[in-house]
Amino acid sequence: MQGIFAIELISVYYIRAMKLKKKARNPIIKAFQFLLSDQRSNKNMTQNAFSKKCGFSRQYVSLVESGQRMPSLDFALNMAHVFEINVKDFMNQLVDKISYYENL
């Protein structure tokens, strides 16, 4: 049940994020930047290796990690799978990071 709540909360954040004009201040993008970079570093994985495992291009991964692209929900789910994180736990981590960046 908590996992469903986290996914619904992420959906709300996505809707809010689309209304933000400046991507640099978008807490969702910042949260994904942090989580992707942190998880890749923990797994000693290059962007190229990650992109092959998750099924997205290296360019797309680079854009997400540099904060130039809003990641899709499909990307988020693949990211959790590649890093072997339970989707519910991943969404909770994401919500925590979004809350952190919103309060900066």
Image: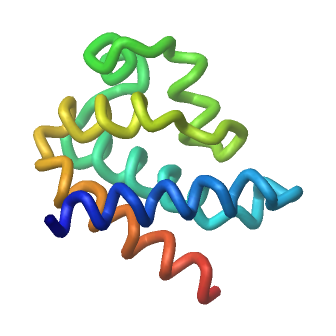
Q: Quadrant location of the C terminus?
A: bottom right
Judging from the image, the colouring scheme is rainbow
Residue 55, position as x, y percentages in the image: 36, 12
Depth check, front residue: 39 or 26: 26
* Residue positioned most to the right: 21
Q: Quick one: 94 or 83, which is closer to the camera? A: 94
Q: Position of residue 71 (x, y in %)?
A: 54, 38
Q: Residue at x 57, y 37 (%)?
A: 64
Looking at the image, the residue that sits furthest to the bottom is 103
Which quarter of the picture shows residue 21?
bottom right
Tell me where residue 80 sits by quadrant: top left
- Left/right placement of residue 58 relative to residue 68 reads left
Residue at horizontal 31 percent and vertical 40 percent from the top: 40
Q: Position of residue 16 (x, y in %)?
A: 68, 63
Number of marks in the image?
0
Q: Residue at x 50, y 61 (%)?
A: 31
Say which quarter of the image contains residue 77. Answer: top left
Q: Return the x and y of residue 93 as percentages of the image width and height.
A: 30, 66
Q: Residue at x 50, y 16 (%)?
A: 58
- Rendered position, 53 above or below 93: above
Is 85 in front, or is 62? 85
Q: Looking at the figure, which quarter contains the N terminus?
A: bottom left
Q: Residue 68 or 20: which is nearer the viewer?
A: 20
Please indicate whether residue 79 sits to the left or right of residue 67 in the image: left
